[in-house]
Image (cartoon, grey):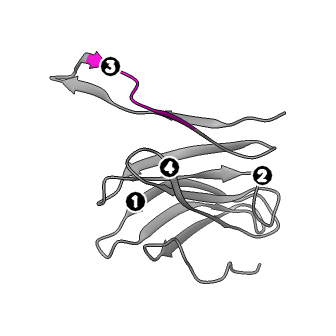
Amino acid sequence: MKKNISIIMSCILAVGLISGCSKTWTKIYGGSSDDAFFSVQQTMDGGYILAGLTYSYGAGLGDFWLIKTNANGIKQWNKTFGGSGLDWAYSVQQTKDGGYILAGSYGAGYSDAWLIKTDAKGNAPPTPTP
């Protein structure tokens, strides 16, 4: 079964109340298997960074999934990180140097905590081996 993720942007919040909400764009990202995002943040350039889990791409059972988009949700690049087990990215933040820091779990052993620091294009050192 194919499951994709869509992002709907542009709800205007004022004093804790929704004063207006309009769909300005919707994008679907994903492959032929289950994929999900657990964290999204607007980047310094006005785009978005999304982090989660992909079963469609990568090297293992499931891998960290990192996508960078422009302000209109058009994918600029796509990265996966992981080993042979199930790896999930739960959180992503842009760092002052323009790179990204991801936190999640690594499927080696009994699901260890995993922290990855990337450069601005999502490149990181090789995945550790158990």
Q: Nearer the viewer, residue 86 or 41?
A: 41
Mark 4–mark 1 Cα distance, whole angstroms, equals: 19 Å
Mark 1 residue element: strand
Q: Is residue 105 left or right of residue 14?
A: right
Q: Which marked residue is nearer to the observer: mark 2 or mark 1?
A: 2
Write the start and end of the magenta stretch as one range. 20-27
Query: Vertical placement of 74 versus 19: above or below?
Result: below
Q: Which marked residue is nearer to the observer: mark 4 or mark 3?
A: 4
Say which residue label 3 marks: 21
Mark 4–mark 3 Cα distance, whole angstroms, equals: 21 Å
Residue 43 at what x, y percent from top left?
34, 57
Residue 6 at what x, y percent from top left?
57, 34
Say which residue label 1 marks: 93
Mark positioned earlier in the residue sequence (4 or 3): 3
Mark positioned earlier in the residue sequence (2 or 1): 2
Mark 3–mark 1 Cα distance, whole angstroms, equals: 25 Å
Q: Check disc 2 and give the amino acid type.
A: Ser
To which quarter of the image does residue 129 belong?
bottom right
Query: Vertical placement of 44 versus 1: above or below?
Result: below
Q: Which marked residue is nearer to the observer: mark 4 or mark 2?
A: 4
Image quadrant holding the C terminus, namely: bottom right
Mark 2–mark 1 Cα distance, whole angstroms, equals: 23 Å
Q: Check disc 1 and give the amino acid type.
A: Gln
Q: Nearer the viewer, residue 10 or 111?
A: 10
Say which residue label 4 marks: 74
Say which residue label 2 marks: 56
